[in-house]
Image (cartoon, rainbow, N blue to C red):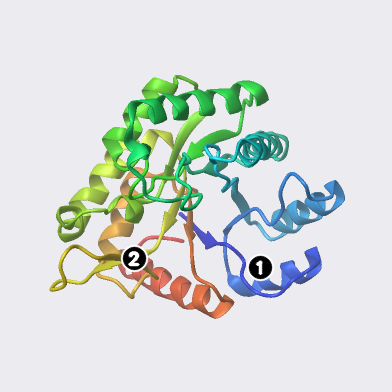
Amino acid sequence: MLLGGTIAGQWSTPEEWEALLVRSRFKAVTAPFDCHTDPQAVAAYREICERHGVVIAEIGTWKNLFDPDPVRAAQAMDYAKGQLALAEATGIPCCVNIAGTSSPAGWDAADPDNYTARTYERIIESVREIIDAVNPTRAFYCLEPMPWMVPDGPDEYLQLIHDVDRPQFAAHMDFVNMINSPRRYLMPEAFIGECFGKLAPYIKSTHIKDTRMHPTRLTTILEECSPGEGTLDYEQVLAIMDRHLPKDAPVLLEHMTTFDEYAAAYDYVAAAASRAGIAV
């Protein structure tokens, strides 16, 4: 697998980003540009990655398609189409977003409406609209699972893939986001194996992190954290991934803030991979 993440640190030019990339040791990265970036800069970042043998694994949208403000919702839809079109033009396999919410509390908020039949139909309609507008042949539009938003489990993801019914709709894997109950938390390897066993044929990119639960505080409190700061056995987790994913599958650390935090997480996962006999 190709272990990497998002390049953190201070940079304002492709050359400064390149220096951080080399220090990071990453073999896969998230795109450091978007559909509003000057095409010459996009070309420069792509050339840097090619020169260092680094894959740009995914480009994010991270906009709320169901924003209660119709202007912002329309802007989010236009941006999603622009991001998928850029992924198609540059050969980035995964354009990823979350499904969206009509909640006024935030773009990724937990809300009862997230699970209504109408919202489910809106998810299908929005994904189809984005894919049909761009008509990609090598890039895939994907939804990152969320703890409180469809898709929130492997079966729900499979059903959504079936219902969207577009070959360029695929899966983005974030198993920690789907560890959203004590049952899944307490038996994580079985659940992670289920996720990859069911979704592996559709996975275009994978996020990795860790999770921890407060065992004595009621009710359930689950927290995301960096690899090594939670309770996942990463030798077992990586072995599951290695069994199901291609050898060149991108696996991206996420949600650290600083370069040093990413470096520490990289070291932890790389050491676990070495003990498991898995190349990263």
Mark 1 residue type: Leu
- Looking at the rendered structure, which numbered label has been put on residue 210? 2
Give the Cα distance between marks 2 and 1.
Answer: 23 Å
The numbered dot on residue 21 is 1
- Residue 189 shown left or right of residue 74 in the figure: left
Q: Secondary structure at mark 2?
A: strand
Task: State which quarter of the image contains the N terminus.
Answer: bottom left
Q: Position of residue 35 (x, y in %)?
A: 74, 44
Q: Residue at x 15, y 71 (%)?
A: 215
Q: Nearer the viewer, mark 2 or mark 1?
A: 2
- Give the camera-side residue of 23 and 124: 124
Neighbour tally class for label 2: few under 14, some 14-19, many 20 plus, Cα within 10 Å: many
Displayed quadrant of residue 131: top right
Out of 114 and 137, give the one closest to the viewer. 114
Q: Type of residue at label 2? A: Asp
User: Residue 228: percent from the left, percent from the top?
Assistant: 34, 74
